[in-house]
């Protein structure tokens, strides 16, 4: 059976896990192509207009798989750590997609860390057993998936951003006065070259070295985000705030770019927290809002102005 994996949202975080798991239990995995204008337009046709930009793009990825696969894999990501949830959009994603594409078969096991390790294994084992995988095969598939995910994350912690078909060195151009820039943003925005208008490449081509929250281990971002007066309920927002606080407090960056997507609820809260914290440490910060009309020229102008300002501050 051919199963589609949309290249959007949490694909950028967990693609080694899902690709390995599905392949090991016997599926042929088909990943949707990188985002393009056409694919985004397709998403806009099917999605509700109030939804955030990355979810609209996700609809486009699902549409691009329709003729190529027998089913689409969209796990229901409720929680990935015991003390927090994911954004509500991830909880409802399989239902939203089902409503928009009633003819597509969707497989959506629930991932809910609040049910503990046993609950998580049980969900995946039950999912695999539906396709006649033996218990041994299903368990081996989970082990292989975890191993590949760990290797992927070890590479990320070394500062590399090895997203498939999108290998971006983050170490800057040695021929230009280098400045260090932290990009606080969701992986599905900053590693999607179309949505971010190639932000990482634009920065590295202009002499900046770049770090993203994926380069910071969970232990570290948890420690720094826990310094906030109030506990954050959303894991991925906690990750990007914790990573940013780590860079800011330890003086690991010269400036911070906060990438938000249009119509994202959590982002609007995170923005104020980050601006507040950056101000305390006199850290330059530039918010960048991505929407379906983001133009190359506007992003280039802002990136160049921000880097010029950082260079004046660092090398003056
Ligand atoms: S965190 Fe924001 S951008 Fe991400 S899925 Fe939720 S609403 Fe959309």
Image (cartoon, rainbow, N blue to C red):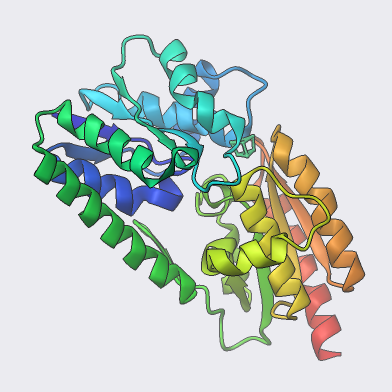
Q: Position of residue 14 (x, y in %)?
A: 39, 50
Q: Position of residue 171 (x, y in %)?
A: 53, 79
Residue at position x 56%, y 67% from top?
219
Quadrant in which the N terminus is drawn: top left
Is 125 above or below relative to 289? Answer: above
Is 189 above or below relative to 1? Answer: below
Q: Position of residue 88 (x, y in %)?
A: 60, 30
Q: Is residue 194 visible?
A: yes
Q: Is residue 313 left or right of residue 128?
A: right
Quadrant in which the C terminus is drawn: bottom right
Is 4 above or below relative to 274? Answer: above
Q: Is residue 19 left or right of residue 230?
A: left
Q: Quadrant of residue 107?
A: top left
Q: How many marks?
A: 0
Q: Is residue 1 left or right of residue 268?
A: left
Q: Quadrant of residue 308?
A: bottom right
Q: Quadrant of ligand 1?
A: top right
Q: Is residue 38 visible?
A: no
Is 150 above or below relative to 45? Answer: below
Residue at position x 72%, y 56% from top?
258
Residue at position x 30%, y 42% from top?
121
Q: Position of residue 290 (x, y in %)?
A: 67, 43
Q: Nearer the viewer, residue 265 or 170?
A: 265
Q: Nearer the viewer, residue 166 or 304?
A: 166
Residue at position x 52%, y 28% from top?
91
């Amino acid at each position: 059976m051919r199963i589609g994996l949309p290249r959007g949202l949490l694909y950028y975080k967990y693609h080694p896990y899902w690709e390995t798991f599905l392949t090991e239990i016997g599926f042929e995995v088909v990943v949707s192509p990188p985002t393009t204008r056409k694919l985004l337009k397709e998403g806009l046709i099917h999605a509700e207009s109030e939804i955030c930009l990355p979810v609209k793009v996700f609809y486009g990825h699902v549409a691009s798989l329709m003729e190529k696969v027998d089913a689409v894999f969209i796990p229901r990501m409720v929680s990935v750590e015991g003390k927090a949830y994911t954004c509500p959009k991830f909880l409802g994603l399989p239902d939203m997609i089902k409503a928009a594409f009633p003819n597509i078969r969707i497989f959506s096991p629930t991932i809910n860390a609040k049910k503990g390790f046993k609950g998580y294994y049980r969900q995946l084992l039950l999912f695999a057993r539906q396709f006649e995988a033996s218990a041994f095969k299903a368990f081996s598939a989970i082990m292989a998936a975890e191993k590949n995910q760990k290797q992927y994350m070890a590479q990320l912690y070394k500062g590399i951003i090895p997203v498939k078909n999108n290998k971006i060195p983050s170490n800057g151009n040695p021929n230009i006065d280098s400045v260090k820039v932290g990009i606080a943003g969701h992986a599905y925005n900053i590693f999607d070259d179309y949505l971010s208008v190639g932000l990482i490449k634009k920065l590295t081509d202009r002499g900046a070295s770049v770090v993203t929250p994926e380069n910071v281990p969970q232990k570290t971002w948890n420690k720094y985000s826990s310094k906030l007066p109030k506990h954050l309920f959303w894991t991925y927002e906690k990750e990007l705030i914790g990573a940013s606080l780590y860079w800011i407090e330890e003086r690991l960056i010269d400036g911070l770019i906060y990438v938000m997507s249009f119509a994202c609820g959590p982002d609007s809260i995170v923005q104020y927290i980050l601006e507040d914290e950056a101000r305390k440490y006199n850290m330059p910060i530039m918010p960048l809002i991505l929407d379906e009309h983001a133009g190359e020229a506007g992003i280039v102008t802002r990136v160049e102005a921000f880097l010029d300002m950082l260079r004046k501050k660092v090398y003056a």
